[in-house]
Amino acid sequence: MRKYFITGLLVLVPLVITLWVLNLIIGTLDQSLLLLPPQWRPELLLGFNLPGVGTILTLVIIFITGVVTRNFVGNRLLMLWELLLKRIPVVNSIYSSVKQVSDTLFSSSGNAFRKALLVQYPREGVWTIAFQTGVPGGDVKNHLSGDYVSVYVPTTPNPTSGFFLMLKKEDTIELNMSVDEALKYIVSMGVVAPPSPGSKAAGQASTSTTPEVANH
């Protein structure tokens, strides 16, 4: 009896959590429907609420914004818009900070969250996984002697909160795993361990030699 109950949990718990996360994401993105006039909203046109319409609208808005700002006219309008925001005292500090973070995270040439590291935290002898976000800058680097890196140490099982640290590069170990694999390892609290580099290499080697064996 207990065996069947655990099997049911193993099947249903991931499904329920996945549906809950999707519902949270879609529910948040559907808030873009509030931008439409009331008479254009699905609940009035169709007579019932249709989840996901706002998500599609959000993706369309993001795509159109990217298309418009990629050309000369759109780029000029964006520059004028940013100059306007920079003249507003409170908005300027918030917008500039958020823009710097988003440019660093989403830029294809950036190095933020490109490397998974093994660091000692919160004390020596205790190890955890962190993500390299860059190097110290501004006046901070003038007070640090040596080669330092900036890292983000996420919490478990919620990686959206964590700690920002600046560590000596020699005190960090670069891991041979992708950021996605490291995130799965963190969220699962160490239960879902990524495959070791040796097993990956062995798997690739066996795959590459299979056709040759078949030909013989």
Image (cartoon, grey):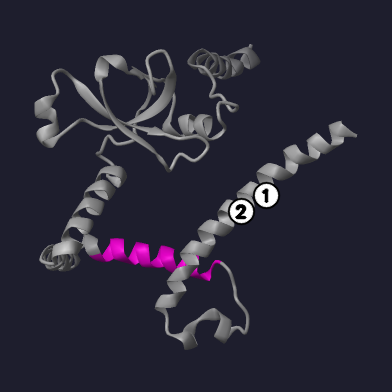
Q: Label 1's element?
A: helix
Tell me: residue 149, above or below residue 54: above
Badge 2: few (under 14), some or many (20 or more) residues near its Cα, within 10 Å?
few
User: Which residue shows up at 42% across the image and 80% down it?
Assistant: 36
- Tell me the quarter of the image containing the C terminus: top right
Q: Are marks 1 and 2 in contact (CB under 8 Å)?
A: yes
Residue 119 in magenta stretch: no
- Image quadrant assignment for residue 24: bottom right
User: Which residue shows up at 10% across the image and 34% down it?
Assistant: 139
Q: Label 2's element?
A: helix
- Tell me the quarter of the image containing the N terminus: top right
Residue 56 in magenta stretch: yes
Q: Which residue is mark 2?
A: 20
Residue 39 can be seen, yes or no: yes
User: In this view of the protein, which residue sits in the foreground, 78 or 27?
Assistant: 27
Badge 1: few (under 14), some or many (20 or more) residues near its Cα, within 10 Å?
few
Tell which residue pokes out farthest to the right in this image.
1
Q: Which residue is mark 1?
A: 16
User: Which residue shows up at 15% across the image and 17% down it?
Assistant: 146
The magenta region covers 52-68
